[in-house]
Image (tube, rainbow, N blue to C red):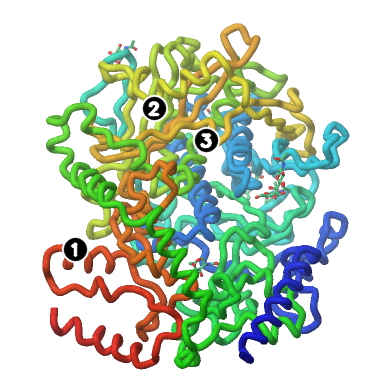
Amino acid sequence: MELGQRGLGLIAVGLFACVLIMGAQAGTGPFDWMGYDNFDEIDDRMNSVNAENCMSKPASELRLPSETLAQLPRFNQLLSMIIYPNRTKLLHLHNMALNRAFFYSYIYQKLNESEAFQYQPGLMYFYFSAAADVSANEYNINGSAIMFDNNCSYANWYRNLPFNTTLNLFGARAWRFDDYNEPTNWLREPTNTTLNLEDYGAGSQSNYTTKSYKTNQWYDLWLPDGWDKEGLDSVRKHTYDIGIKYSNETGKFATDEFEAKTIFGPPSPGQRETEHLPVVWTEPYYDCGRSNRWIVSAVAPVLDQLPRYLEWFHLRRFRFVAVSVQDIEFLQVDFNPCPLGIGNEPPNYFHATARCKDSTMCEPLDGWGFRRGGYRCVCKPGYRYPPWQQGPFNGIEIESSTLEEYENGFDCVPVELQEEVAVPKQKVVSKHTAHHRQKRQAFDQVKYDRMMAIIEHKESVNKDNCETFKAEELELPGDVAYGVEREFSEQARTALRLAHFLSNFLQNIDLYEEYGNLRGDKLLNIELLFGEALANVMGDLRIKGSGVFYDIDKFKGPDLLTRQFFGPYAYRYEKEDEGGETGDRANTHFRAIDFAGFENHYLDAPWFKNVKERWQSNTYGLIKYTEKPLIRSDLGGTSLKKFELYPLYYRAPSEKDGWWSAPYFDCNGYVNDWIISYSVPFFGQNSIGSAIEFKGIVRVDIRLDELDINQCPMDFHVPNAFKDTARCHFANTYCEALPGKNFYRGGYKCECRQGWEYPFNDRAWYFDGQTMEEEYRKLMDGETSRYETLKCRISGASHAAVSWMAVLLMLLPLWS
Ligand SMILES: *[C@@H]1O[C@H](CO)[C@@H](O)[C@H](O)[C@H]1NC(C)=O
Ligand SMILES: *[C@@H]1O[C@H](CO)[C@@H](O)[C@H](O)[C@H]1NC(C)=O
Ligand SMILES: *[C@@H]1O[C@H](CO)[C@@H](O)[C@H](O)[C@H]1NC(C)=O
Ligand SMILES: *[C@@H]1O[C@H](CO)[C@@H](O)[C@H](O)[C@H]1NC(C)=O
Ligand SMILES: *[C@@H]1O[C@H](CO)[C@@H](O)[C@H](O)[C@H]1NC(C)=O
Ligand SMILES: *[C@@H]1O[C@H](CO)[C@@H](O)[C@H](O)[C@H]1NC(C)=O
Ligand SMILES: *[C@@H]1O[C@H](CO)[C@@H](O)[C@H](O)[C@H]1NC(C)=O
Ligand SMILES: *[C@@H]1O[C@H](CO)[C@@H](O)[C@H](O)[C@H]1NC(C)=O
């Protein structure tokens, strides 16, 4: 009785809290009872800096401690650790930094002969590449740059700069411009489609290599190169083996063999090495005078053999010549406010800033960024929610509660206390609804059998027998790829980035032009495009292959000759070598091939045709981007001036304009695996320059094995081949998919439904899907199985049952 009254009281308090939440701003702690903590400290430090005062602040006030960034993705752990949704943005930033570092390292070493100098990237190549990093990554990349060290940039875009002479400094950066206050922006809301482009090596205070430059930590992380003073060259400069098969004629390859090239690139540590990572991170810093935001950068090195074009080869070294810098807004980075523990290891500046009560456990939520309330409190094992509480307590509600509400709420109830209480009516009702729900979405044997058939078929195909299957047998149904858009969004954006770059370039550089002393960019040549395809694969361990496929008669090189087909496609080499002794062969060996050399052209392949059909006659729906390039006024970089064409515009697709294929087995003798492809179009000027037209597609391939499958019950219309196949006891548990489990059965957990509790005293509070699958199999095979015991019981069941079950559980392994 007493409990009931208290419950009613709390419901009232809860309602009151709801009203408060609606009034209060999300993420603020408005009440005195919440002491000043590390979150407040950082918040205050950030608020004390703004666009007006940042110039006069000392460097220390323009930075935040590195501990404010926990669990940064580290290259050596990427293959062995699950990357949760709260770190996917940072991982993508990491991979894009690597992508650009590989591209420039590759292209400089590939086009190293003096005759090839003019085919190296020109000024706008740098600018447009950085712009594409930003425009194609609306939600995570706000800035992108290549920053050269002193006397390391052999610019090919000045007529009065001899080919063997360098610019002092050169740094091409693009960042998203906050244009809410532009006179033309009458909505007064940032359009997110305007980019500023600037050469950091020009203007006053342009020497970003000096100690007195306040926000250049990205420089110190790799530069200047020590010229092996510390003897670290062998671990800091890694060799990559790249083979290319060219074709200069439709249906024929230039050679039967791959043309090999070894290049030096960023380090590639094995999984056990913790040092010499290829991508390092800056502390958060204030981007003073540019975007005027707090940002974090991922930084990777670019290598070249310097000094170039020198007769005395013994004087030349592979050295770090530049850094690739990719920025994310600090406010977008999730942090874990829960107490330290497994999964939340130190350092974490914001640990224990959540306010979960003792009877609950804190779980971080993703997508909150730097805001309070990004957590929820779930009952500890041995506790359950009070009857009036629907599921976990939300951090945002706790953060907006008064002291009185906090002290009287947000607690779970110990299971033991409920021993004597009869089953309340409300729980009977919930049991009833559970049954009802079970009827609608229970385990489905037909779907289960179909799933097993799909998996069996998938596993029966391999590189040695794939030729013997019919074409349609090398495809899986489209609903097998359920969830790809979400899970591989970052990989899709890697393709999108290249589509943005190509669209920008093909719409703005249609012919070679000179602007006084400044040389315009030459048209794209095949080496640049092979390099871009390779960089997509080299920069992201989840990308198996990536290519650029030009539509028929659309590729025109710097020689102004049109090629019928051009399809440079790069892929990670030799699957069976992945995770070998050194674990890095698949990460250091790459192949690329021009699809023009195949006898069957690619125009009719679904991944090309479907996209082309949508876009070839109608380019409506593309987004228009504006870029504002500032370039140096003279060779020395005395000041900045507007580029002759200012501003520039380009129209480019968004992620949803791309197309995901159904899974298929790539049996052409190169990739030899089940893959899923994402293809996205790019656009250029038509031949008379009157409009833009479809020019081709960029594609990325991901191995099907990387995809998580979701076996939980879903509505009948959800196109998921594996739904309704989870083995949970649905009368008392519900199913939740677990991320990072890949293409294996059992990637889910069965949690107790409202009104039911976990019966075992084994520190868990849910049943693991893999156990459920395995125990069910035993049951079916007539072996001893725990399957029937792996269910929750009605809350408040007798204490004795707990110990009885626990004993049984402990004994079981002995029997079986
Ligand atoms: C270009 O690189 C190759 C190695 O890939 C090297 O043998 C050659 O000497 C280099 N040429 C120049 C001019 O540096
Ligand atoms: C940076 O990106 C975020 C989204 O990730 C956006 O909210 C923010 O306004 C951007 N900053 C600028 C200066 O555009
Ligand atoms: C860069 O080159 C210029 C001209 O050759 C020279 O004066 C300057 O000292 C060099 N700077 C560095 C850091 O080597
Ligand atoms: C550049 O090459 C010219 C000859 O081609 C040579 O006279 C000059 O010394 C070289 N300059 C440098 C910095 O190597
Ligand atoms: C620009 O980005 C911000 C933050 O990500 C978003 O709130 C806003 O709606 C975007 N503007 C447009 C026009 O999409
Ligand atoms: C920039 O600073 C570095 C280090 O102080 C110096 O060596 C270099 O010559 C400077 N570069 C220019 C262009 O002033
Ligand atoms: C293609 O390459 C081969 C071998 O390098 C060469 O003999 C042939 O002339 C080339 N064809 C064209 C059209 O360039
Ligand atoms: C991200 O989520 C995982 C799983 O919930 C958690 O272990 C980890 O601590 C979280 N990391 C951050 C920085 O929030």
Question: Callout 1: few (<14), some (14-19), or many (20+) C-alpha neighbours within 10 Å?
Answer: some
The disc label shown at residue 777, or none: 1
**Residue that sits furthest to the front in the current view:** 425
Please state if 140 lies on the left or on the right of 211 as rendered: left
Q: Residue at x 44, y 76 (%)?
A: 756
Residue at disc 1, secondary structure: helix
Tell which of 332 and 51 is nearer to you: 332
- Residue 315 % position (x, y): 44, 46
> Mark 2 or mark 1, which has the lower sequence index?
2
Q: Residue at x 46, y 56 (%)?
A: 278
Vertical order, 207 against 12 (above or below) = above
- Residue 28 % position (x, y): 76, 69
Q: CA distance from mark 2 to mark 3?
A: 15 Å
Vertical order, 91 against 374 (above or below) = above
Name the kind of residue labelled 3 in the image.
Answer: Leu
Ligand 1 is found in the corner quadrant, namely top left
Residue at disc 3, secondary structure: helix
Residue at disc 2, secondary structure: helix
The disc label shown at residue 496, or none: 3
Please state if 584 lies on the left or on the right of 392 as rendered: left
Name the kind of residue labelled 1 in the image.
Answer: Arg
Q: From the image, tell me which residue sits under label 2.
A: 607
Vertical order, 721 against 364 (above or below) = above
Question: Callout 2: few (<14), some (14-19), or many (20+) C-alpha neighbours within 10 Å?
Answer: many
Q: Quadrant of residue 369?
A: bottom right
Question: Callout 3: few (<14), some (14-19), or many (20+) C-alpha neighbours within 10 Å?
Answer: many
Q: Residue at x 37, y 42 (%)?
A: 481
> Mark 2 or mark 3, which has the lower sequence index?
3
Q: Nearer the viewer, mark 1 or mark 3?
A: 1
